[in-house]
Amino acid sequence: MQRDWIAPSAAGLGVRLQALGKRFGERTVLDAVNLDVAPGEFVAIVGRSGCGKSTLLRLLAGLETPSSGAVHLGDAASAAQRDDVRMMFQEARLLPWRTVLQNVQLGLDSRDAAARARDALAHVGLADRAGEWPAVLSGGQRQRVALARALVHRPRLLLLDEPLGALDALTRIEMQRLIESVWRELRFTAVLVTHDVAEAVALADRVLLVEDGNVTLDEPVALARPRAHGSAAFAELEGRVLARVLKEPPPEAAEAPKPRLVA
Amino acid sequence: MKGAHIRSLVPWLVPIAVVAGWELASRIGWLSSRILPEPFAVAAAFWNLLKSGELLNDVAISTGRALAGLAIGGGLGLALGLLTGTFKTAETLLDTTLQMVRNVPPLALIPLVILWFGIDESAKLFLVAIGVFFPIYLNTYHGIRAVDAGLIEMARSYGLKGWALYREVILPGALPSILVGLRFSLGLMWVLLIVAETISAQSGIGYMTMNAREFLQTDVVLVGVLLYALLGKLADLVARGLERRFLRWNPTYLGAAA
């Protein structure tokens, strides 16, 4: 299979946020966020709903303009939309009046657009659905088409705005594996916003917690990939981050629950 | 397969029964031919008019008027709907006015139309055009307004703007609504044409029926009435065909295509 389009020629894009702030009217959503993401790194952002994590992502995508501070992508100070930055949304947002293949080709006007789109579809395992309408696909398949649509542009920064939030548990795990495998292969920088701490720990090199308009936790995940959800180290880290999100005291280490229940 | 054939006949049972009852009533003498001629007489009148070429001529003229009115009124409705749907300034400037005018029934304009245009072709075109204008205008406007903002944002983030964004996202998104407007318009088109042709005409189906009324040819009047029914049904079929063709992607039509 020809796959030259995915050659990791342009590796990941480094991200630097300098005192980035965003206000909507009176409400301060983000307050002077400083953050560095290394090229090729996979960062997950967790937080309660409404904490500003999606706004942060939309600022990276150039869909919002900062109220203060700056976003640097690679060498450029940038707030504009760029061709090497692609976003996956919570919903697949496929054009229902275009076939799967045409959807993947959206915004691609090179001569080999169709061939590249086919390759991207093959990459997400949907080569045989190219001619179908989005309406006949399942939710998971739609998100896979959306992933192919993002990948076909050879993104150097892929932004994921809770793209798996609406999927059932099994499809979710499948999609997580798919995202991890394309990320490992293509070496783009990935920023994933999620409310699922387990998902963040499973995928990311670093888990960030956004709270009250700022990053209040920056937790490296030093687990070997691929990560097993069941392992003790995984569970311990997940518990710790979750407790931090919920502002509860951290769980009693990572020991198995003591058999205190007596019938 | 056999079941499907039988089922496709079921909708025709009632019309057939009505015609049979009508024929029977005429034969027995319950219905005078001055009020309602028997179906065979209507069929015979239809055949005679068809043979003489009068019928086709009148149908062609009426259809021409209807389509010309649709093209003018529908075209303007589409253009203005696209304008007000797309540009906030155009909406602010025009929409209130159009919404006010919309509440005037086109038929209320007949006295004015006669004063302005007399009783010639332009009066009929004007009536049809103004009647079909509003369904298409309103549905185009709302169709464009109702295009999923998420899709527009997605397309923008994929680098689409200007005409490309319009062609790929906004127009196809508004199309289902525009076609609903077209379907409404096709129905109204005939209604308005009938009225216009009944007021005064030297040709067309309306002229044919009014002329026949003078000579108490109820069979010819009925031919005219049935022609309008047929043409209306035909227009509806065309509109449905267009929906099936352009909205293939819509789950509503996916089953029908299979």
Image: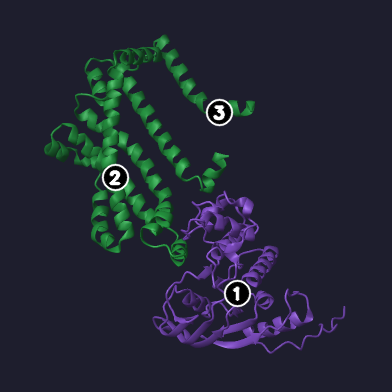
Chain colours: A purple, B green
Q: CA distance from mark 1 to mark 2?
A: 48 Å
* Residue A3 in sight in this render: yes
Quadrant position of residue A205: bottom right
Residue A205, above or below A139: below
Percent x, y for residue A251?
73, 87
Observer-side mark, 3 or 2, equals 2
Which comes sooner in the sequence, label 3 or label 2? 3
User: What residue is shown with label 1?
Assistant: A194
Q: CA distance from mark 3 to mark 2?
A: 37 Å
Question: Tag on residue B75?
Answer: 2
Q: Chain of mark 2?
A: B
The residue at 31%/37% (across/down) is B189
Question: Tag on residue B73?
Answer: none
User: What residue is shown with label 3?
Assistant: B8
Q: Which secondary structure lies at badge 3? A: helix
Quarter occupied by the N terminus of chain B: top right
Kindly identify the amino acid type of the residue bearing the numbered disc 1. Answer: Thr
Kindly identify the amino acid type of the residue bearing the numbered disc 2. Answer: Gly
Kindly identify the amino acid type of the residue bearing the numbered disc 3. Answer: Ser
Query: Do the CB atoms of the residues marked 3 and 1 lie less than 8 Å apart?
Result: no
